[in-house]
Image (tube, helix red, strand yellow):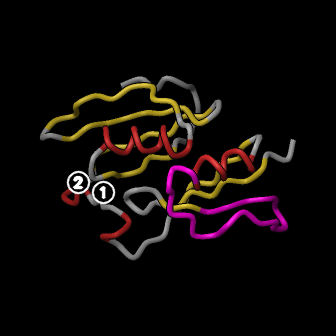
Amino acid sequence: MKPLKETNVYSYLNYSDVPKAMEWLEQAFGFQPLRIEEIGNGRQHGEMWIGKEVIMMATANPNLGMKLPAETEEAFGVFIYVDDIEAHYKKSCDFGVNVVNKLEQKSYGYRYIAKDIDHHNWVFVKNPN
């Protein structure tokens, strides 16, 4: 499978239900779906745009060591710059996203942290440019 964007590093997250996760990420954070495909045994692979970047995801498969955050003690987060942090934060709050750290100024920028439907951490920070 050839990626839709040429880069050397992609975030790749595991979800219990990829179509549901993609719909949720679109509604909660404004990500844009690129594609979803069956990869066998009832599992799916999905890709979404986040601004000019791509994030990938698949149905969790413990047999391959691909677990959900709730099934492991490992911490992982995705850090994303957004142009209008206030509007992004409001959209997330209006949708009912689980915001674990409210919008606040930090040394690296104005940011908030949220969890998605499978408890992945998302750190959204105002784009410094």
The answer to whether 102 is drawn above or below residue 125 in the figure is below
Q: Observer-nearest residue: 114 or 72?
A: 114
Q: Observer-nearest residue: 30 or 57?
A: 30
Badge 1 marks a residue whose secondary structure is loop
Badge 2 marks a residue whose secondary structure is loop
Residue 112 position by quadrant: bottom right
- Estimate the x, y position of residue 47 in percent, counting from the top left: 43, 33
Q: Amino acid at mark 1?
A: Met
In the image, what residue occupies the spot 54% across and 32% down?
49
Looking at the image, is mark 2 or mark 1 earlier in the sequence? 2
CB atoms at circles 2 and 1 under 8 Å apart?
yes
Q: How many marks?
A: 2
Residue 63 position by quadrant: bottom left
What segment is highlighted magenta in the picture?
A: 94-113
Q: Observer-nearest residue: 76 or 102?
A: 102
Residue situated furthest left in the rendering: 41
In the image, what residue occupies the spot 45% across and 56% down?
116
Q: Residues within 10 Å of mark 1 (few under 14, many from 20)?
A: some
In the picture of the structure, the residue carrying the numbered disc 2 is: 61
Residue 106 placement, left or right of 67: right
In the image, what residue occupies the spot 37% across and 35% down?
46
Q: Amino acid at mark 2?
A: Asn
In the image, what residue occupies the spot 48% across and 38% down?
26
Residue 87 placement, left or right of 31: right
Residue 99 falls inside the magenta stretch: yes
Disc on res. 66: 1
- Estimate the x, y position of residue 103 in percent, counting from the top left: 72, 63
> Alpha carbon of mark 2 to alpha carbon of mark 1: how far?
5 Å
- Estimate the x, y position of residue 11 in percent, counting from the top left: 50, 46
Q: Quadrant of the N terminus?
A: top left
The answer to whether 15 is drawn above or below residue 104 in the figure is above
